[in-house]
Amino acid sequence: MKTFNNKSELKDYINAQREQGQTIGFVPTMGALHKGHLSLVNFGLEDNSVVVVSVFVNPTQFNNSEDLKKYPRTLDRDVELLQSVSEKKIVVYAPSVNDIYEGKTISEHFTFGGLEHEMEGAFRPGHFDGVGTIVKRLLEIVNPDKAYFGEKDFQQLQIVKKMIELKNIPTEIIGCPIFRANDGLAMSSRNERLNSEYREASPFIYKTLKYAKEKFGTKSAKVVTDWVKKQYKKHPLLELEYFLIADVDTLKPVKRKSTKKTYRAFIAVYANDIRLIDNIALN
Ligand code: PAF
């Protein structure tokens, strides 16, 4: 499997592929790959001749230095996993911080039409400037036809789509469904850090989301939100950071339900010191 650490070599390789008429798909990741990432790669392989997978723990999107330090780094295993999917059609780009940031590890500042102020933006200051910076840089390097993002980070997906529009980036952004473990826990690289007690407790997150969806059919957003908050107050292990029901286009919390709008419920929960997020389509 071809693995590049250097952006000029990767660009030369991609240009050569393009000259042969190949189409390029792109899956950006921070490594510690799991089945959720592999499902994105498989979507990419269905649509494109070559899929570039970046593996880069982006320092500028972490607002908590402990979280950055503890983020799992498992490049050899990641490459092996990708090899098991396709040796020939997948290319890995695993750059150093310097290859990306060239000595200036700072974020650009972005406005994404207000999407950046909600939920993760409110609880993780600077996070979306970091995400915008790295995704824009990676898209400039890879210049893919299509790039694949998971709906687990739904706010990120909407923000990346907005950035493509605002910056006229010629890549199609494809949102892919959340990949869940059999017990419903959304796949995340952070799950690996859960001890058995917290791992057993965490499917509760998806359970509450499913109940919330059911209740939202007949009840107001406020009633559903209060109900969810109450469930977490009673829970011995999981601590709710936020739960809210928002319009998918603006990501603003719903005040009054409208049949013309599409809603999703979003949640962030601490399992010990591990922050887990999830969401569900409501209508
Ligand atoms: O979703 C992620 O893993 C990251 O935010 C991304 C898109 C790879 C940017 O670092």
Image (cartoon, rainbow, N blue to C red):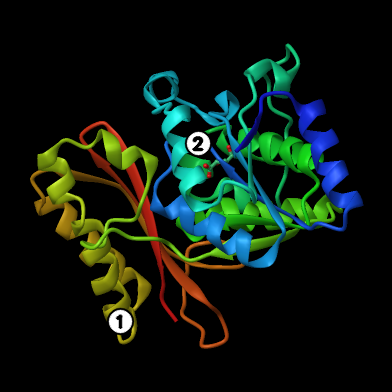
Q: Is residue 62 left or right of residue 266?
A: right
| Occupied quadrant, residue 98 | top right
Label 1 sits on residue: 219
Percent across and percent down for residue 157 are: 59, 56
Q: Marks 1/2: CA distance?
A: 47 Å
Which of labels 1 and 2 is toward the front?
2
The three-letter code of the residue at mark 2 reads Val
Whether the residues at callouts 1 and 2 have beta carbons within 8 Å, the answer is no
In the rendering, which numbered label is found on residue 79? 2
| Image quarter in which the C terminus is found | bottom left
Q: Secondary structure at mark 1?
A: loop
Q: Secondary structure at mark 2?
A: helix
| Occupied quadrant, residue 66 | top left
Residue under the point 30% across and 81% down: 219
Q: Nearer the viewer, residue 13 or 43?
A: 13
Residue 114 in sight from this viewpoint:
no
The three-letter code of the residue at mark 1 reads Lys
Q: Nearer the viewer, residue 149 or 119?
A: 149
Percent across and percent down for residue 201 are: 14, 50
Percent across and percent down for residue 40 are: 53, 57
The crowd level at tag 1 (other Cα within 10 Å; few <14, some 14-19, many 20+) is few
N-terminal of the pair, mark 1 or mark 2, is 2
Q: Is residue 47 left or right of residue 261?
A: right
